[in-house]
């Protein structure tokens, strides 16, 4: 029997039972154990962005130029892209839990190695593997979160968790203030300690994460329904005890043709053939947010020091980061109430328009006013960017979820996230050599604005109304049984709708 062959058929009500659960302390365990990793990502990116001067000094740092700082950012993103694809397919094959433990271990190890960098080459390699761990986390964590969080809360939770990146960003920015103060600590050790503290935080998260269960949805599709049933019963008992409420019964069920693995060709066919509109949607969202964030944030510290003479950028970046987190936290519930399509359009187009206006008037800003304008722009953008991950994780069949997240993250980030830091680094370098002002980097703002507005327009026409709906109704599992009454109004989704904002699809190869 080949690995991908059918192993059995079951009818299960596990998805409906998970979706009908009230919010409880158990769900907070999932959020803390899985979601806090974005704090690490924010810490990583901010440390690099804030420490451009420390890393540039050949005596206390590694002698990196502005272009090298951009290269380091691009290398980190390249590692994240490759790590997402590599670990993403393993997540769909071997399970969410195994991979979200492995990817965190990869991140931790690489971060420690970064702290011990002796030269630029070592530093670049360590940054690559740090990115690989984070990229794998995006695939494993987002898929696990969406499969464990009830449908009613999925939008706000996913957006807020992805937005928690900015908690780490704010913490990292403030952390660099004492670590980069020569009166507090030797500058040859400050930046190294910053990376080391990130590794310590990762170990703490790993200890919490061990208590998060495997996704029952993944288990029943891969022939381990008894394990999935046991986990759901345990979750139900825990939630019932915590809330003091009797859980209502459910009537919805789904019949599954179990398989040990799902082939890569079948996944590719699903993404490109069965869901072409959703493919375009996710690509547009990821390219826009990747260029905007990686270009702007990776080099913002360098921008402030080079053009505005700011010596300590930590305070500026901390304020900027707080506004980003507040955007995801405050606007996140609106993705469940107002809806995915409207909120994606508003956040992408709104932030893109403001960014373009900022590019036109760059010469008129001071460090304070530019940061405040950035706060307004990214208050909107952070919620939209976080929702891009939510979109990729919920609009494709369960068997492909982790790899789809990885695929769009990798492709979108490669297009926007690698080019962005390199472009901004080059623009800053050229402006410095030519004695030009900050307006020399306006091109990067214009490109980011165009990509964000384009993403918002695509969302308006091709977005999926997924709010409050089960994952199985948004995109039918590839292994789900078809039945004649499905098309007669049972609520089971049909093939991808002719209208891009149609609420549901069935993974049936008829188009």
Image: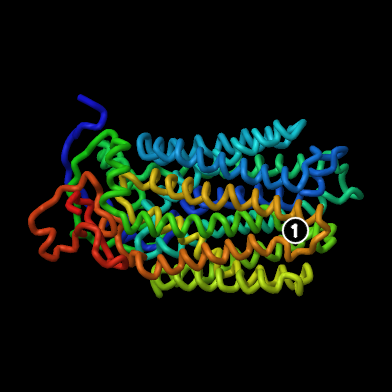
Q: Residues within 10 Å of mark 1 (few under 14, many from 20)?
A: many
Relative to the observer, which residue lies in front, 14 or 183?
183
Q: Position of residue 355 (x, y in %)?
A: 61, 69
Q: Does residue 17 appear in the picture of this structure?
A: no
Pick out the residue farthest to the front. Answer: 434
Residue at position x 19%, y 59% in the image: 494
Residue at position x 55%, y 60% in the image: 163
For label 1, the SS is helix
Residue at position x 16%, y 40% in the image: 9
Pick out the residue farthest to the top. Answer: 1
Residue at position x 47%, y 65% in the image: 454
Q: Position of residue 413 (x, y in %)?
A: 52, 49
Q: Count the marks: how many?
A: 1
Quarter holding the C terminus? bottom left
Quarter holding the N terminus? top left
Q: Position of residue 290 (x, y in %)?
A: 54, 55
Relative to the observer, which residue lies in front, 371 or 199?
371
The residue that mark 1 highlights is: 303
Q: Position of residue 209 (x, y in %)?
A: 50, 43
Instruction: Please identify the quarter of the rendering in which residue 99 is found.
Output: top left
Tell me: 386 left or right of 300: left
Pick out the residue farthest to the right. Answer: 183
Instruction: Please identify the quarter of the rendering in which residue 27 is found.
Output: bottom left
Q: Does residue 269 appear in the picture of this structure?
A: yes
Tell me: 500 left or right of 58: left
Tell me: 130 left or right of 414: right
């Amino acid at each position: 029997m080949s690995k991908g062959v059918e192993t059995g058929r079951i009818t299960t009500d596990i998805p409906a039972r998970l979706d009908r659960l009230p919010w409880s302390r158990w769900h907070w365990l999932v959020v803390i154990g899985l979601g806090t990793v974005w704090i690490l990502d924010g810490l990583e990116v901010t440390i690099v962005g804030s420490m451009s001067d420390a890393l540039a000094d050949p005596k206390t740092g590694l002698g990196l130029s502005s272009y090298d700082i951009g290269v380091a950012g691009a290398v980190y993103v390249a590692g994240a892209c490759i790590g997402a694809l590599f670990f993403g397919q393993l997540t769909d094959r071997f399970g969410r839990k195994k991979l979200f433990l492995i990817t965190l271990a990869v991140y931790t190890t690489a971060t420690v190695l970064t702290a011990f960098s002796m030269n630029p080459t070592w530093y670049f390699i360590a940054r690559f593997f740090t990115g690989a761990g984070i990229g794998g986390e995006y695939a494993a964590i987002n898929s696990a979160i969406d499969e464990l969080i009830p449908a009613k809360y999925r939008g706000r939770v996913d957006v807020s968790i992805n937005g928690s990146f900015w908690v780490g960003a704010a913490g990292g920015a403030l952390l660099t203030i004492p670590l980069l103060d020569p009166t507090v600590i030797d500058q040859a050790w400050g930046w190294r300690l910053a990376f080391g503290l990130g590794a310590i935080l990762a170990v703490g998260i790993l200890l919490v994460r061990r208590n998060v269960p495997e996704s029952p949805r993944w288990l029943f599709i891969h022939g381990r329904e008894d394990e999935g049933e046991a986990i759901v019963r345990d979750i139900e008992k825990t939630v019932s005890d915590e809330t003091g409420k009797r859980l209502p019964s459910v009537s919805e069920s789904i019949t599954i043709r179990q398989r040990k693995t799902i082939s890569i060709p079948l996944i590719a066919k699903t993404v490109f053939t069965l869901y072409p509109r959703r493919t375009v949607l996710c690509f547009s969202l990821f390219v826009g947010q990747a260029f905007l964030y990686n270009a702007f944030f990776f080099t913002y510290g360098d921008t402030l020091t080079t053009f505005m003479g700011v010596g300590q950028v930590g305070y500026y970046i901390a304020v900027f980061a707080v506004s980003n987190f507040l955007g995801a936290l405050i606007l996140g519930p609106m993705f469940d109430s107002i809806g995915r399509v409207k909120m994606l359009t508003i956040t992408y187009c709104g932030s893109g328009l403001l960014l373009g206006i900022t590019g036109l008037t760059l010469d008129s800003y001071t460090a304070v006013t530019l940061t405040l304008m950035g706060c307004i722009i990214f208050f909107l953008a952070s919620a939209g960017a976080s929702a891009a991950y939510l979109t990729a994780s919920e609009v494709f069949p369960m068997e492909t979820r982790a790899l789809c997240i990885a695929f769009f993250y990798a492709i979108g980030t490669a297009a926007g996230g690698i080019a962005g830091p390199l472009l901004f680094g080059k623009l800053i370098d050229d402006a410095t050599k030519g004695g030009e002002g900050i307006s020399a980097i306006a091109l990067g703002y214009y490109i980011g604005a165009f990509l964000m507005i384009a993403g918002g327009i695509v969302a308006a026409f091709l977005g999926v109304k997924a709010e409050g709906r089960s994952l199985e109704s948004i995109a039918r599992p590839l292994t789900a049984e078809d039945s004649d009454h499905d098309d007669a109004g049972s609520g089971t989704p049909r093939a991808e709708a002719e209208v891009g904002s149609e609420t549901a699809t069935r993974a049936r190869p008829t188009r």
